[in-house]
Amino acid sequence: MSNQFWLKVLEQERAIAVIRAHSWQQGCEMAKAVAAGGMKLIEITWNSDRPEKTISYLRHELPDCQIGTGTLLNLEQMEMAIDSGAEFLFTPHTDLSLIQAAVKANIPIIPGALSPTEIVTAWQAGASCVKVFPIQAVGGVNYIRNLQGPLGNIPLIPTGGVTLKNAKEFLQAGAIAVGLAGDLFPQNLITQADWQGISRNAKKLMQQIKD
């Protein structure tokens, strides 16, 4: 997937479901639930149970969605993710070797960064866009808004503190998209296997951010 196409997808969808599952079957159900609620960008974190199998299965089961992965820490994990069919790659940090490998493979790479220096370093190294993580630790919406002056040319995806209530505020502050995990997948709904409840969360999110 080219960077240009990836950015168009982000501008259209605006939200990414971040799934960290204790069993691969659970991860698949979580993904199907948010897809039923209208979300089309789904990240399976690499520290989930059997992420390769989950990604491969979801690529087949959810052809209308883009299935990617995150929490990639090294080249070996990235190569395994690419082999399993991941369509985009998130890392929690900025590692130039990972960015360069993803660029060579022509797969969107979204490294994690926090300070302006880290964000610019990731972008200049070839990042497709930059994940600002953990956003809650540095001021949330106001931090994204303050970055727009000097760094408004860099597409940013805040994660780690985005909720159903504040997701639209991040987009209005200048983020190209947002990533949601815990607030989209409350532990009580997962424990009860209430996939319809998770679908309702996803539908509510998409309605809010696209209004």
Image (cartoon, rainbow, N blue to C red):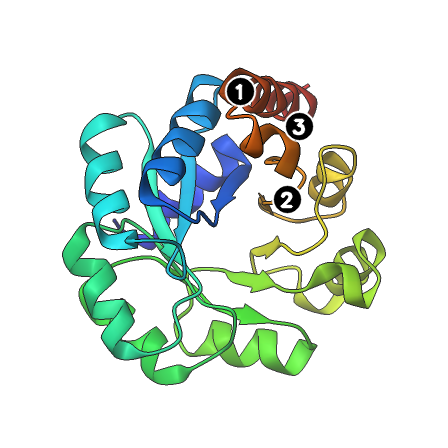
Residue hosting label 3: 209
User: In the image, what residue type sits under mark 2?
Assistant: Gly
Q: Nearer the viewer, residue 86 or 198?
A: 198
Near mark 3 (Cα within 10 A), the count class, few <14, some 14-19 or many ≥20, is many
| Distance (Cα) linking label 1 and label 3 | 16 Å
Instruction: Please identify, in this view, whether the residue under mark 1 or under mark 3 is nearer the observer.
Output: 1
Outermost left residue? 83
Q: Can residue 178 be seen in the rendering of this structure?
A: yes
Residue indicated by mark 2: 182
CA–CA distance between discs 2 and 1?
14 Å
Q: Tag 1: residue type?
A: Ser
Whether residues under marks 3 and 2 lie with C-beta atoms below 8 angstroms apart, the answer is: no
Q: Secondary structure at mark 1?
A: helix
Q: Is tag 3's residue or tag 2's residue first in the polypeptide sequence?
A: 2
- On screen, 175 above or below 37? below
The residue carrying mark 1 is 199
Q: Amino acid at mark 3?
A: Ile
On screen, residue 175 above or below 132: above
Label located before the other in sequence (2 or 1): 2
* Frontmost residue, 125 versus 27: 27
Q: Nearer the viewer, mark 3 or mark 2?
A: 2
- Say what secondary structure mark 3 lies in: helix
Question: Is 128 on the left-hand or right-hand side of 137?
Answer: left
- Give the percent coordinates (x, y) of residue 83: 14, 58
Image position, residue 41 (x, y; %): 42, 37
The answer to whether residue 63 is seen in the rendering is no
Image disc number at residue 109:
none
